[in-house]
Image (cartoon, rainbow, N blue to C red):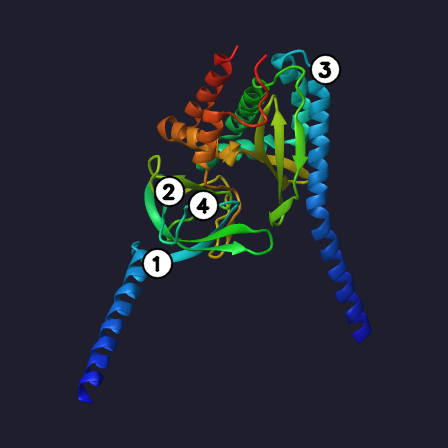
Amino acid sequence: MTSRRHLMIIAALMVTAVTAGASPAEAEKRLRTAVDEVLGVADDAPNGDALSSRVRPVLERHVSFETMTRRAVGFGWRQFNNEQQRQAVRLFTTVVIRSYTDKFTPGERPAITWQPAVSPASGRVDVPTRMVYAGSNYHVTYRMEDVGGWRIADVTIEGVSLVANYRSQLDATFKKGGAAAVLQSLEQSISRRP
Amino acid sequence: MKLPQLELLVGAFVLAGLAAVSWLTVKLGARNFVGGDTYAIEARFDNAGGLNAGANVVVAGVPVGRVEAIRVDASDFSAIATLRVLAGLNLPTDSMASIKTSGLIGDKFVALSPGADETFLEPGARITLTESSVDLESLIGKMAFGSLDKEPAP
């Protein structure tokens, strides 16, 4: 009886150790795959616009745009109906991809130095990196989340979070005009760009 | 023989008075000005530079609490700030905490922005979606003097 209990405790400990050890590593592996895939697509892209359309399916696999949009809208999200939520995710995805591919310089390849991943909470892993792109040095941290598989849920550049940046803007818009105003401002942001 | 004893007594009294005043200063500095019931939550920052115990915690610009304590988490050397906020405030679990500065060189405070989750932060829960102090000086430095890695423009 006692030995059986011991065995069970040991087994439980082993399972905990394996999951605790595997999670950050798994998240980091997933992130590296994502970065490699994006770079693979970016290498052949002649300009930002072409990259934007080519990179979208790749990013949709690795980035949880649904989580990002929900968080970026913040408290007002619960008052969006299903159709508005779907529309917001679609528009926000375009805004995020556009804003990053706009900074794309053909022929440049970022040099990434990976730093040790940390897990600030269960189901969350932060992967800090240092990146040199087009001659400039950036501190970029990827926030990975386990949403039925590891996905990128936020990116911070020099300590400024993508989600927090959009949340401060969209929350103000929501308070002024509700869900319709948020969707309209996202649409405007997309149509302003060439 | 009597006089030195009296002087000693006066000296001790003055010291006790000074100790009381300094204790009061420290206590008042970190005092919880928010009335009513409160609860404590934690926020994890990569860098809490400039944030002090007693700093304001605001939601939508309205003070709703105070920073109670800041410590270093020995496991990953991150900064853990304990925030004491009003009990009536139900913060969604994906709320974000950012260290902001009032004005350009003013005091630091913690701004909470409520998220979209339908579950709420329990007392003692930890916010991990945070934005640390932005090191304005180094950003200005990079902008003014350029980054070292930057190659000269062709």
Residue, disc 3: A44
The numbered disc on residue B11 is none
Image quarter of residue A100: top right
What separation in Å lies between label 3 and label 4 (alpha carbons)? 42 Å
> CB under 8 Å between callouts 3 and 1?
no
Chain that bears disc 2: B
- Residue shown at the point (58%, 29%) measured from the top left: A137
Which quadrant is the N terminus of chain B positioned in? bottom left
Residue at the far left: name it: B3
Residue at the far bottom: name it: B1
Residue, disc 4: B49
Label 1 or label 4, whichever lies nearer to me, is: 4
Q: Position of residue B83 (x, y in %)?
A: 42, 53
In the displayed structure, A78 sits above or below B56; it is: above
- Residue shown at the point (52%, 31%) measured from the top left: A162
Label 2 or label 4, whichever lies nearer to me, is: 4
In the displayed structure, A60 sits above or below B119; it is: above
In this view, the residue in front, A124 or A1, is A124
Left or right: B94, with A108 as reference point? left
Which quadrant is the C terminus of chain B positioned in? top right
Image quarter of residue A181: top left
What separation in Å lies between label 1 and label 4 (alpha carbons)? 29 Å
Residue, disc 1: B37
> CB under 8 Å between callouts 3 and 4?
no
Chain that bears disc 4: B
Label 3 or label 1, whichever lies nearer to me, is: 3
